[in-house]
Image: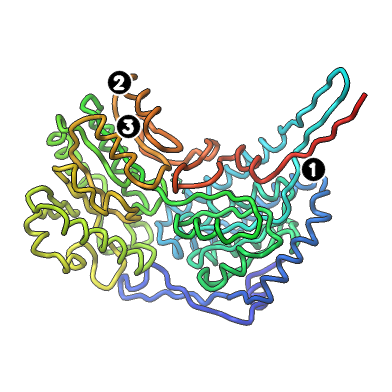
Amino acid sequence: MHNIEDFFSEFKKQYQTTSPYSNINQKVLTFELPFADKDYIEKVFLLAKEKFKTWKMTNTSVLVHKMKQFIKELQFNQDKIIYYCHLEAGKSLKDAETEFLRTIEYIETSINIFQNFQDNCFNMDERMAVFSRQPLGVVLAISPFNYPINLLVSKIVPALLMKNCLVIKPASSGTLTATYIFLSLLNAGFERGVVNLVPGKGKEISDLLIKNENINLINFTGSTQVGKYIAKSTYFSQLIMELGGNDPAIVLDDADQKNAVKEILNGAFSYNGQRCTAIKRVYVHENIFEEFSKLLISEFKNLITFSSNIDENSKVTPLISDAAVENAMNLLSESFKKMNPNDFEVFSLNNQITGQKVANMIGKENLFFKEKDTNLIFPTIILIHNSNYDTLIEKEEQFAPILPVIKVKSLKEMIKLANSTDYGLQASVFTKNINIINQCFQEIECGTLNINQQTKRSPDIFPFQGIKSSGISQQGIYQSLINNSTIKGLVIKK
Ligand code: G3P
């Protein structure tokens, strides 16, 4: 039975991370984590390359058995995985549990789809041919902090089912969660070398990982900036990338406003907006802007329950890091500076502030929008009555519970604004008009268009892809299996 103490003892160096819950209720929560050095990383890739020679020949029923065993081992470690996901990512226990259960379903569905893969066969007058799926080799899986279970396992499972070897680099704030997932793989019978975990500070070891010559595929989820760096640094590997998103929601004047409000609040504020698929800006038709805003603000106060007395069940939780808070505060400041104070109002939970009052507070916003000495940002809506500002809070990804809602004159302008950022992950449109749906589907630049519902990736069986700076390649259960493999043909002349 593999255990965490033995695994951690393999590393000479350590470093510390801090839970987002630190400083809440005066508690400080830090973790002592292992740090892989150059030597360790090089050995891991060589071992993975060596193991691949035999692993790729694995009998499929043995592989499926191990994968089913992996589910059992995850369930055995369920409490620890959920607990560390909660502490490391800063999400409620309930959200961490939902993520865990969703991930078990992901594995079960992957096994089913994998077992139904068919080779392509051709029987022609002069030749017969079979094109079958083959592994790529060594896959480097780099997972982010925000879904430390789901976005790691959704890289592990397709890579292993397609008989690749795997090197995992989890986010620093996800290392303990990832370690229990890794131990579950080992205890399920996947050998060291076939699966490998490389813990450490991304900034210091990323070049040693992404530039290694033995990698055949890098599967990365994280920021667009890091994704672009990886894409230009890699030796010669394929790429699957899920990067940033700045998903817009468009509300037309015929929309079911009650439904739109509910979907938008969920889409923008769940997990404090720290989802690449969160709704990050809303464009509302001027004919309904007043009515819609009133409904939005009143439901905002009902639906988003906030208390600065955080416990493990609180839905609104602290942001992942000081840097994340700083980024959000900076986007706010820059946006406020750009606007005429008469053109906007700010609703932070339980407080309404006029643009004029905010204008007098520029430089001191932290005091108002966040809890002192913590990473807890108060959920906030900014109503903007003029669509010409092109503020940073619209343009950039805030990854925080702050939502700009902008009054817009026409559908044409809404589409233009929706397309005005570098991102292209998802978008939502709220309308009953089939012609508008059709036009938006043709014109909005995104991987998935949602009608009358929030932007979201789940259910995981759906294909998932971003365009522009939001990603490379496609995921989803079937697409991930395909993109973790290649094809090899055998053609026989008759
Ligand atoms: O990109 C993170 C993704 O897995 C979030 O899923 O369904 O909450 O959009 P969902």
Residue 63 x %, y %: 76, 47
Of the 4 image quadrants, the one containing the N terminus is bottom right
Residue 84 x %, y %: 50, 63
User: Considering depth in this image, is 26 or 201 the residue closer to the camera?
Assistant: 201
* Element marked by disc 1: helix
Q: For mark 3, does the 10 Å Cα neighbourhood hold few (<14), some (14 to 19), or many (20 or more) residues?
A: many
Residue 116 x %, y %: 71, 32
Q: Name the outermost residue toward the right.
A: 494
> Height in image: 114 above or below 216?
above
Query: Which residue is labeled 2 in the image?
Result: 433
In the image, which is nearer the foreground, mark 3 or mark 1? Answer: 3
Residue name at image x 30 percent, y 72 percent: 25
Query: Which residue is labeled 1 in the image?
Result: 61
Residue name at image x 78 percent, y 39 percent: 488
> Residues under labels 3 and 2: Cα distance?
10 Å
Numbered tag placed on residue 429 in the rendering: 3
- Mark closer to the chain start, 3 or 1: 1
Q: Label 1 CB, ligand 1: below 8 Å?
A: no
> Height in image: 485 above or below 308?
above
User: Considering depth in this image, is 108 or 449 the residue closer to the camera?
Assistant: 449
Residue 183, quarter of the rendered image: bottom right
> Number of numbered discs present?
3
Name the amino acid, label 1. Answer: Ser
* Element marked by disc 2: loop
> Residues under labels 3 and 1: Cα distance?
45 Å
> Residues under labels 2 and 1: Cα distance?
50 Å
Residue 356 x %, y %: 6, 56
